[in-house]
Amino acid sequence: MSDEDDIILSELDDEELVAQMFDDLYDGLKEEIEEGVNILLEREWAPYDILTKALVGGMTIVGHDFRDGILFVPEVLLAANAMKGGMAILKPLLAETGAPRVGKMVIGTVKGDIHDIGKNLVGMMMEGAGFEVVDLGINNAVEAYLEAMEAEGPDILGMSALLTTTMPYMKVVIDTMVEQGIRDDYIVLVGGAPLNEEFGKAIGADAYCRDAAVAVETAKEWMGRKHNSMQSA
Ligand code: B1M
C-alpha cells in the first residue's frame, strides 16, 4: 500500500488539500484530482479559484520540473490528463453564469503545437463570460483557421502557442488574413506562455492575453470597441 492510499482527502483542511492536489497532479492521479475538485466544490470554493489555485498552481510546478529535466513527457502527459479530469468537472460550472451571448470566438492551437490545456481554459472562461466558442483543437494550419472563420463568422480569432518554435506561426496566419483582405474583419487575440505584449504587437495581433481571465476582459473590451465603431459608422 502506498502513502497515497493512506491519505483521506476529505479529512485535510483546505491548505493541506490543495498541497496534496499539487502532489497528486504531479503524480498524474486523475481520480484523486477529481475527488479533490469535488471536495473543494462541496466546501463552496468558487470554480475559478479551484481552477487557478489548485489546478493551474499544480501544473506550474510540473512545468518547472519538466523544464529542469526532472519530469519527462510521459509523466507530464499523465499530469495533463489529471488536470483535464479536474477541468471537466469545472467546465459546466464556469459556463453556467447565465450571461447573455456577447460574441463568438474561434480558437485553436497553432500548427506544430499540441499543447491544449491553456487554450481549453480560455475557451471555458470565454463560454462562462457569455461567448460562443468554436474550438479547433490543436495543430492548426492557416487553412483550418481561414475555413473556420469563413464557416463560423466569429467576432474573434484566438490563437494559442506554447513553444517558441511554433509561436511565429501566428504571424503566418495574420499575414495570410492581411493578404486576403480579411484581417480587419476579426479581432485577433493571441496567448500562450512564451508570448508577450511586444510579440503580439510585432505580429499584428490586436492583443496579447496573459491568461484566461485577461482573455475574457480583453475580448469584452474589443467587442465594446467593435460595437462603438459600428454605431458611429
Ligand atoms: Co510541453 N513544453 N512540450 N508538453 N509543456 C512547455 C510549454 C515548456 C515551457 C516546458 C519547459 O521546458 N519548461 C517547453 C517549451 C519550451 C520553449 O518552447 N521555450 C515544452 C516543450 C519543450 C515540449 C516538447 C517539445 C517536449 C519534447 O517533446 N521534448 C513537446 C512539444 C510537443 C508539441 O507541441 N509539438 C511538449 C509536449 C508536452 C506534453 C504533450 C507532454 C504536454 C501537453 C499536454 C496537453 O496540453 N494536452 C506538455 C505540457 C503539459 C507542458 C507544460 C508543463 C504545461 C503547459 C500547460 O498546460 N500549462 C509547459 C510548461 C509551462 O508552460 N510552464 C510545457 C497550464 C496552462 C493553464 O497554462 O498553457 O500557459 P498555459 O495557458 C495560459 C496562458 O498562457 C494563456 O491562458 C492560459 C490560461 O491561463 N493562454 C492564452 C494560452 N493560450 C491562449 C490563447 C489565447 C489567450 C490566452 O487566445 C486568445
Image: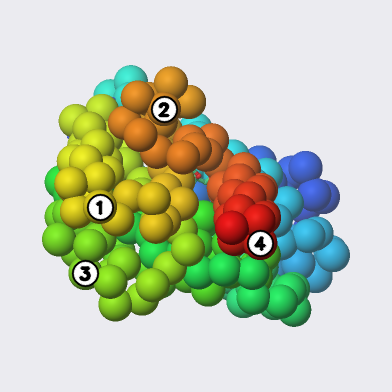
Task: Provide the residue designation for mark 4.
Answer: 231
Dot placed on the residue nearer the N-terminal end, 3 or 4: 3
Quarter holding residue 129:
bottom right
Disc 3, SS: helix
Q: Marks 2 and 4: which is nearer the front?
A: 4
How far apart are the alpha carbons under marks 3 and 2?
24 Å
Q: Amino acid at mark 3?
A: Glu
Disc 4, SS: helix
Residue extending farthest front: 233
Residue at 25%, 45% in the rendered image:
178
Q: Amino acid at mark 4?
A: Gln
How far apart are the alpha carbons under marks 2 and 4?
26 Å
Q: Position of residue 49 (x, y in %)?
A: 73, 51
Q: Is residue 200 left or right of residue 56?
A: left
Residue at 21%, 69% in the rendered image:
147
Foreground of the two, 4 or 130: 130
Task: Provide the residue designation for mark 2.
Answer: 201
Say whether marks 1 and 3 touch (CB < 8 Å).
Answer: no
Packing grade of label 4 (10 A; few <14, some 14-19, many >=20) is: few
Dot placed on the residue nearer the N-terminal end, 2 or 1: 1
How far apart are the alpha carbons under marks 3 and 4?
28 Å
Q: Amino acid at mark 2?
A: Lys
Q: Amino acid at mark 1?
A: Gly
Q: Is residue 189 left or right of residue 3?
A: left
Quarter holding residue 170:
top left
Task: Provide the residue designation for mark 3.
Answer: 147
Task: Provide the residue designation for mark 1.
Answer: 181
Packing grade of label 3 (10 A; few <14, some 14-19, many >=20) is: few
